[in-house]
Image (cartoon, rainbow, N blue to C red):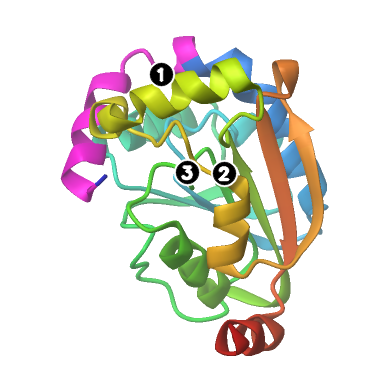
Amino acid sequence: MNIRAIEHAYKRYAGVYDLVFGGVFQPGRKTAVERMRCSLGEKVLEVGVGTGLSFSLYPKHILLTGIDISRDMLAVAQARKIRDRLSNVVQLSVMDAENMAFHDNSFDKVVAMYVASVVPDPARLVDEMRRVCKPNGRLIFVNHFHSQNPLLGTLESLISPWSSQLGFHPDFSLDRFMNKSGLLATDIRPVNIFNFCTMVEAVNNKRLSERLAMAA
């Protein structure tokens, strides 16, 4: 996976993304937003905001910023913001999730839904999310990980060479993700139909994460 491959894949998906990936993955989005427990005036960053399918789930009393590498997906999100008059969506920007332009400690909560298996370097994604999130802020991930079902897991491994065309890694390992990122999870739970995806919740304890990384 590389940035150009991701852009090409989601340029193809932009027009049909809501139809194909909207309803089936919306329960995971809803769970993620609920677990953030957003308070009045908090600043929230959604990494890989896509077409803005999560917008309606956020409370109106927060300030939401969304970024995405795909201009085509973000154009749909911008249209949704205008159509639904979402004044709490304060910024939508084309941006690389692994090299964000935000200052350190800019957000109270940072969430990445269905993004970790898309980016070239998931550990770098987590590092950037930690950097822009305030200390002890909340980090949330929702993603499909390599299935423990032998039949489905084998199928995911077989199609993994076509990751660039698919726009994501179908054999993305939860254990590898947790180990390489050094995330300190406070909750891991299945979401979506047939528990197809997993939500990972973590507190942004930067110092402890750094110590663990050095020890490894």
**Overall secondary structure of the magenta stretch?**
helix
Q: Mark 2 points at which residue?
A: 87
Amino acid on which disc 1 is placed: Tyr
Single out the mark in the foreground, 2 or 3.
3
Is residue 4 a member of the stretch shown in magenta? yes
Q: Is residue 119 visible?
A: yes
Give the mark nearer the N terminus: 1 vs 3.
1
Secondary structure of the residue carrying tag 2 is: loop
The residue positioned 31% from the left and 56% from the top of the image is 95
128 sits left or right of 121 in the view = right
- Estimate the x, y position of residue 78 in percent, counting from the top left: 39, 35
Q: Check contact, mark 2 vs mark 1: CB within 8 A.
A: no
Q: Distance between the residues labelled 2 and 1?
A: 24 Å
For marks 2 and 3 on the same chain, the one whose residue lies earlier in the sequence: 2
Q: Which of 175 and 185 is in front in this view?
A: 175
Q: Which label was assigned to residue 116?
A: none
Task: Please tell me whether residue 203 is drawn above or below residue 187 in the rendered image.
Answer: below
- Classify mark 1: residues with Cα within 10 Å, few (<14), some (14-19) or many (20+): some
* Residue denoted by label 1: 17
Question: What span is in magenta?
Answer: 2-20
Magenta stretch contains residue 53: no
Residue 29 percent across, percent down from the top left: 66, 33
Res. 40 image quadrant: bottom right
